[in-house]
Amino acid sequence: MTTLSIPVKICFHPNTTSSFLQPQTTPHTVTFSRRKTSIATACSASENPQQRQNQQQQKQKRTETSTDDTEFDDYKGFDPAGFLAKRGISHKAFAQFLRERYKALKDLQEEILKRHMNLKEMASGFELLGMHRHPEHRVDYMEWAPGARYCAIIGDINGWSPTENCAREHYFGHDDFGYWFIILQDKLREGEKPDKLYFQQYNYVDDYDKGDSGVTIEEIFKKMNDKYWQPGEDRYLKNRFEGPVKLYEEIFGPNGPQTLEELGDIPDAETRYKEWAAKHGPSRYAVIDSGKEYDVFNVRVDPGWHERVRALEPPIAYWLETRKGRKAWLKKYIPGIPHGSKYRVYFNTPNGPLERVPAWATYVQPDVDGRQAYAIHWEPPPEQAYKWKYTSPKAPKSLRIYEAHVGISGSEPKISSFSDFTDKVLPHIKEAGYNAIQLIGVVEHKDYFTVGYRVTNFFAVSSRYGTPDDFKRLVDEAHGLGLLVFLEIVHSYAAADEMVGLSMFDGSNDCYFHSGKRGQHKFWGTRMFKYGDPDVLHFLLSNLNWWVVEYQIDGFQFHSISSMIYTHNGFASFTGDLEEYCNQYVDKDALLYLILANDILHFFYPNIVTIAEDASYYPGLCEPTFQGGLGFDYYVNLSVSEMWSTFLESVPDHEWSMTKIVNTLISNKDYADKMLMYAENHNQSISGRRSFAEILFGEIDEHSDHYKESLLRGSSLHKMIRLITLAIGGRAYLNFMGNEFGHPKRVEFPTSSNDNSFLLANRQWDLLAKDGVYRDLFTFDKDMMKLDENARVLSRGFPNIHHVNDNSMVISYIRGPLLFIFNFHPTNSYDSYSVGVDEAGEYQIILNTDDIKYAGQGSLKEDQYYKKTISRRVDGLRNCLVVSLPSRTAQVYKLKRILRI
């Protein structure tokens, strides 16, 4: 016995996507409820009674003609195409696709439950696979490699020998699903003897346990026997042959046959006993069943004895008392694989021997200077292991996300570390006013210049930045500052490297990935996962759960979903026709994976946040899975940053279209509360492009005649672009590290093309220590974050955009009690510009981009910060404000006092 199981009650509904695990105080059976409740699907508030009645009639008609449809519609709260009705979308082909996808989801669940007790167990593969310390003085290793014929662990522990620690096919070390199992026994120290108990266990965490108290095993067993046996009951345990001897004597007498030859041919035992019992009466040593053939479970026993045994508690306490502590283990054993040992997994395949970095390794040293990569066994002593100090903060109603890359977060030309980031960057993020961090490039990858998107080892933090405990400290300290920590997770593809990644892992081309063209990304040279394989799902879902359990991650941004849900990897033109989202190019298996991922994460971790990055804007990204959606909390509006880049680089300032700006920023009104927007993220700085600050400030000559004018233009647009991007859209805003103060340079990772230079692979934090435009831009960004924190801008409903003028280049809208006015005109200033407002009253400017402390000109005087409404209909509203709008400025007014007219 190695572990104690907690009795649980599990209820799995076949029409749902997750199982519900609830610990109970008493054991219960596993129940699979197939009862369905007939409840009509709720319609949206915008539907009229006639439309609702028509839908009910159509539903009744379907019920009478199709049993398949009732399987969906009658289930409580579940409608595979429910969000289409809610949004007023009618598209038969797409609705049918959603229903077929739901049927496939149920079939997938049934297949999963044939091998796993529930989805929680399926998403916890990291508890078994990889290296794990076992209480019985050993380390267990498990790996999935169905194409291998032989598996062994090679490393420092055995001189990299492929024969010492191995498992073979058709033996205990290999099952029918391709999972290999290897035991690495701890080694006895010189002079020590093996344990008396073969099941002797050790507590590796605590220095002292009951087993170190000096009580011998014999004394423990005696105490247990004294509790469980009444006087005389253990008589036959100590004298095992006494009962059979007495029964033998009663049947054959004291001088019965002594050999098989003397015994001869005799009737069967039942016939002999009946003959004997007819003469002598029933024997008190005989065990007789209730009369049913082979009824071994209804043996007659003494009722009093039976009740006494039932009242006894299991002897777990005595079993625990036999466990010894860490000191006893260290005194007796040497670890079979010590902490910090290097190792790889060795396979013999039909194509020859292979050495691979284990797929479930949690700490990996990548290929450096031509040396082959290897895994590092991470099992620090308890006194050195990191201990968590803080709990995760609750997810706020609005997210202000600070996107960062640890390696380039330092100011020196080198790879920065987790510790550097924790000590220097985290306080800056807190000061800047953000409430969440999104880290990119944390998961282990082979080449540093790929930024971390070609992942090789999905369960390992990158060793370039430090150890797993260093990363735990980073997350813990962020939580202590009230910051959520998100990871950008790359499950849409994987590195194609065969020596360190998953490609050709067991010698076959289709272990984790599709074979043929479907297994290769058309443009990026990466491998595409086989999402329909239960073992691949086991790996990916467990990977998500691992980051939450091991590192207390608060959320994920799923990178490039369009690469995985289309066989053309999203490289196609989308017109918006729903046919494009349900045709032959859509990978239904990938969609099922995303549904399972969101369901599992949100059910077991209600505070988790999931974000979808999808250039195709797949319908239902942020709809609940029980209504036919994919279940994400937010989606990224990728078109915003592209629009700003195009305007800054290709469109003259006076030709900017206010209508296009507004239409791009609001995108889809129905999903405005689910939208995450950014003016620029890492793509504008890293992917061979220029950051906005480099575009605006990079070509300015300090000695030119137009220096001040160019500097004013750059700072003004930098502030306005960020303010309108944050304040007009959804509930989430993102900024890439350094862009909050207009970092003047892009990011360029060291590659052969730049002679492996780190010159641009860092951030110039020293700019904030100097007076100038960069410090002023940072001051504005901080006040912009405070505006959301104090006035709850992001968490409010969709704004009332009532003024968009392409001629004057002015945009104005109302969001909550705030009035936002933007004048994008490069030259025209307006002394008396009228914009409509709802409420009559007094308004005060609470944020002005033209303020001197924000590198502005300070055109507005103190007395111009207060305005009173005029009772005149403007922009379709009853009242208006007459304001002064300098060119390239934005103002935020707050209603301070309402006037009743």
Image (cartoon, rainbow, N blue to C red):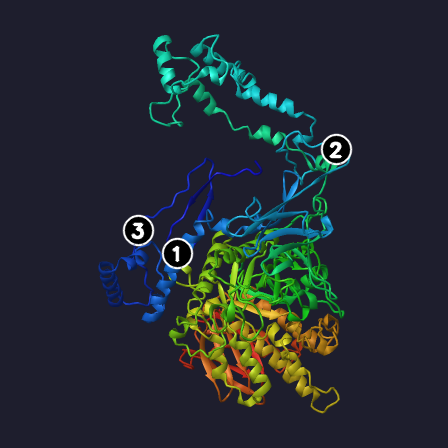
* Residues tagged 1 and 3 counted as in contact (Cβ below 8 A): no
Image quarter of the C terminus = bottom left
Name the spot of residue 334 as percent of width and height, x first: 73, 41
Name the residue: 32% across, 48% down: 35
Which of disc 2 and disc 1 is earlier in sequence? 1
Q: Residues within 10 Å of mark 1 (few under 14, many from 20)?
A: few
Outermost residue toward the bottom?
A: 705
Question: What residue type is disc 3 on?
Answer: Thr
Q: Which of the two residues, 390 or 255, is positioned nearer the viewer here?
A: 255
- The residue nearer to you, when weighing 239 against 779, is 239
The residue singled out by tag 1 in the image is 107
For numbered disc 2, what is the local secondary structure?
A: loop
Looking at numbered disc 1 in the image, what kind of residue is underneath it?
Asp
Quarter holding residue 139: top right
Point 70% across, 44% down: residue:
336
Tag 2 residue: 192
Give how far across and how far down residue 33 sits, in percent. 36, 46
Q: Which mark is residue 37?
A: 3
Q: Which mark lies nearer to you, 1 or 2? A: 2
Of the residues under marks 1 and 3, which one precedes in the sequence? 3
